Image (cartoon, rainbow, N blue to C red):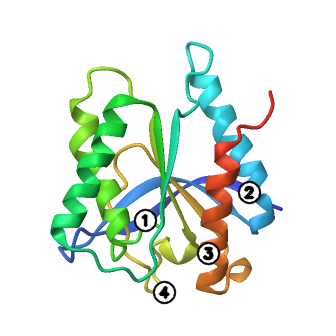
Amino acid sequence: MSLLPDTVPVVVSADGSTAGIQLCPALILGSPQALPGAAKHIYSRLAAAASEVDQGVPDLIISLISHGNSLSTKYMSSVEKGLKSFLTGCGTWIISSGEVNDPLSRVASGALRNVLPQLERQAEVLHVLVNSDDVIASDSTSSKNVVDTSLNTLLLVCRKEATESAEDIAKLRAATAVKLAHPPPG
């Protein structure tokens, strides 16, 4: 049940454009059983930085998980427009795969990129990318490209050995949404 806070390099690209490397804060889970510790770590770090009670606790958690979906540009624009209204109206955390080939991850990243720089108040917005350690850039393997991680993004990575199938990762994403929806006590 190991949990390691770190900063990791990821390969970032947008809709097939040139890739670049970004550093992203990450929590690396040794196995899915470390998820409760990760949730507690996230909430305790946000509480430590809060200036008032309940600051750092989201009003809404949105899980944008797709698997092999193909969405039209019109539909993606519609989802992004709806997402922007949440981001400007209340504290929102978004959970996604973070993969650039996932249209809902691209929508979440685009909404953050368009809304956060324009907000006048301090936004309680967090984009949690949940994936295997395949997203970490390294010389030895080809990593999965991810969406822009430059704004309010946290990478929650589980070791590949513990999440061998796409089904295991899907279960981890669902469990992350449930675990983050229930802040740990004190």
Q: Which residue is mark 2?
A: 35
Q: Determine the secondary structure under disc 2.
A: helix
In the rendered structure, which amino acid carries the disc numbered 4?
Thr
Q: Amino acid at mark 2?
A: Leu
Residue 144 located left or right of residue 88: right
In this view, the residue in front, 186 or 136, is 186
In x, y percent, where is residue 101? 34, 77
Q: Is residue 160 left or right of residue 99?
A: right
In primary-sequence order, the first of circles 2 and 3 is: 2
Q: Which mark is residue 141?
A: 4
Q: What element does badge 1 sit on?
A: loop
**Label 3 or label 1, whichever comes before in sequence order:** 1
Three-letter amino acid code at disc 1?
Answer: Gly
Q: What residue would you read off at disc 3?
A: 169
The residue at the point 64 percent across, 26 percent down is 47
Per the image, label 4 sits on a secondary structure element best described as: loop
**Label 2 to label 3, Cα distance in Å?**
12 Å
User: Quarter of the image holding residue 104?
Assistant: bottom left
Nearer to us: label 4 or label 1: 1
The circle on residue 124 is none
CB-based contact (under 8 Å), mark 4 and mark 2: no
Q: What kind of residue is marked 3?
A: Ile
